[in-house]
Amino acid sequence: MAQGRRTSAVPVPDAAASGAGPAAGGSRGLVRLVLILLSLAIFAGLCSALVQQVWRWLDQPVTQVRVLGDARHLDKAELARRLAAGLNAPLLQLDLVRVREKLLDDPWVHGARIRRDWPPAIEVQIDEEVPVARWGDKGLLNHEGDIFWPQLKPEYESLPRLNGPASDTGRVMAQFHDLNRMFQGAGLKLRGLSLEARGAWTLELANGMRVVVGRERVTERLARFIQIYPQRLAEHAEQIEQVDIRYTNGVAVKWRPRPDTDEKAG
């Protein structure tokens, strides 16, 4: 008698009923993504609001201008007042480049560095010009040979007076330095030096005497003048207006005009 074939069956769950099909899995992923994006949007919004609050807290009108640095000719308090009067934006919106340019408009300001500070303030570190000589009738020279044009005061009269083409300030300063050392060795002091456009030199001594040197053999001519001066000229220095040393075998002396004795007597 043949035995019957045994079979076993495993029940298959109803996909629709269990909710475990592909469509259900995709829905859960989409919901998760939406929640993440929503969270990020809320976080970004909070950060943006916080940044705006911080910006408004920092970007307030400037309440103080501090000017630092050594100053002999500048009035730092007055400079700070002028800067403060020209500020037209709160702290973070200030154009510091323009503020610096405004500072450099002052002839006595050689350089300036500016930074923002808190509470709302700007701090200015200035470098003042250091005059080493006069330039012509109205200008001054700094230690770098740059010309600047402040309002001249009587105290600058004691500075050496230099003159020449504006492009040759460095050359004139160097020549003055060299000639001043040369003359100090002979007991004389230079008060001024001029360079003409064609290259001729004229110098002025501290006693007011002008010396016309010319443009050739300058050192040789001045060495001869220094030799002649104590022998023939020193005792008459107060009466001499100008000495022309461009001659080979001597010098030409121009005397100061004598006062009219009749006018003096009257």
Image (spheres, rainbow, N blue to C red):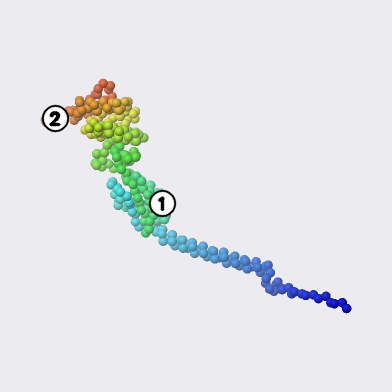
Read off the residue under disc 2: 263
Question: In the image, which is nearer the foreground, mark 2 or mark 1?
Answer: 1
Q: Nearer the viewer, residue 181 or 127?
A: 181
Residue at image x 23%, y 25%? 228
Secondary structure type for disc 2: helix
| Residue sitting nearer the eye, 164 or 264 | 164
User: What amino acid type should be assigned to the residue bearing mark 2?
Assistant: Glu
Q: Quadrant of residue 161?
A: top left
The extreme right residue here reads 1
**In the image, what residue type sits under mark 1?**
Asp
Q: Secondary structure at mark 1?
A: loop
Q: Which mark is residue 139?
A: none
Badge 1: few (under 14), some or many (20 or more) residues near its Cα, within 10 Å? few
Q: Quadrant of the N terminus?
A: bottom right
Q: CA distance from mark 2 to mark 1?
A: 67 Å
Quadrant position of residue 252: top left
Residue at x 39%, y 54% (from the top left corner)? 116
Image quadrant holding the C terminus, namely: top left
Is 159 left or right of 23, judged from the image as shown?
A: left
- Establish if 15 lies above or below 225: below
Tally the marks.
2
Q: Earlier in the sequence, mark 2 or mark 1?
A: 1
Q: Residues within 10 Å of mark 2 (few under 14, many from 20)?
A: few
Q: Position of residue 249 (x, y in %)?
A: 26, 21
Q: Is residue 216 or residue 86 the one in the foreground?
A: 216
- Examine the rendering and report whether any part of residue 205 can be seen: no
Q: In the picture shown, does residue 38 fall above or below 262?
A: below
Q: Which residue is the extreme one toward the bottom?
A: 1
Q: Which residue is mark 1?
A: 95
Residue 122 at x, y percent in the picture:
37, 54
Give the farthest residue toward the left: 265
